[in-house]
Every structure is written in C-alpha cells, then in structure tokens.
Image: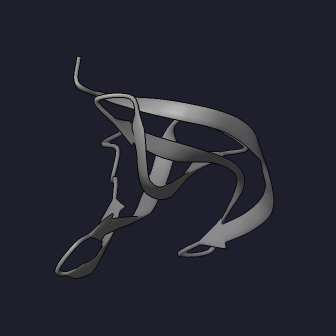
Amino acid sequence: AWVKAGEVRPGGVSDVDGVKCTRVDFTVLVEGRSMGDASLCIGDDTGLPLERTSTLHFPTGDMTLTEKFVWAK
C-alpha cells in the first residue's frame, strides 16, 4: 500500500519483440511522494501486459528497471 501509481497518462503505441502494444505512462509514488516514472505496454491483441519500464530516483542515484512478461498459450 505504500507504493502506488500516480498521474496516469497515454504513452503512445509501441512494439515489444514484434508485438504491437499501447503504453500507459504513470508516476511512481512512495508514501505519497513522487519517486520516478514508469510505463506499462499492453498488447493490442490480448490486452495483457508485455513490458514495464521504470526509473526511480534515489539520493544515491537513479535505478532503471525493465520487466518483460511472457504469457503461455
């Protein structure tokens, strides 16, 4: 409950490993404070998440993370 999505906005269209998707961008809030930005790419054909990228800002430097999701058929 201490990490939440903040302002959500359209992120445009993209392609993850040859699969078309639509991005949803948002700020990352930790205990109500903006700590960075993230983007979730949702497959156009399936409606399932394909990739999430985020950059979080810490006093010691930024951390960038990319997660890819694979769905079994």
Using the image, determine if residue 59 lies above or below residue 34. below
Tell me if 49 is positioned left or right of 69 in this view: right
The residue positioned 65% from the left and 35% from the top of the image is 7
Measuring from the top left, give residue 26's x and y in whole percent: 59, 44
For the C terminus, which image quadrant?
top left
Tell me if 17 is positioned left or right of 9 in this view: left
Measuring from the top left, give residue 49's x and y in whole percent: 49, 42
Residue 47, quarter of the rendered image: top right
Tell me if 24 is positioned left or right of 51 in this view: right
The residue positioned 43% from the left and 44% from the top of the image is 28
Using the image, determine if residue 1 lies above or below residue 16. above
Tell me if 64 is positioned left or right of 50 in this view: left
Q: Nearer the viewer, residue 2 or 39?
A: 2
Number of numbered tags placed on the structure image = 0
Using the image, determine if residue 30 lies above or below residue 66. above
For the N terminus, which image quadrant?
top left
How are the colours assigned in the image? Answer: one colour
The residue positioned 51% from the left and 57% from the top of the image is 37
Residue at the left extreme, as displayed: 60
Residue 8, quarter of the rendered image: top right
Residue at the top extreme, as displayed: 1
Q: Nearer the viewer, residue 67 or 10?
A: 10
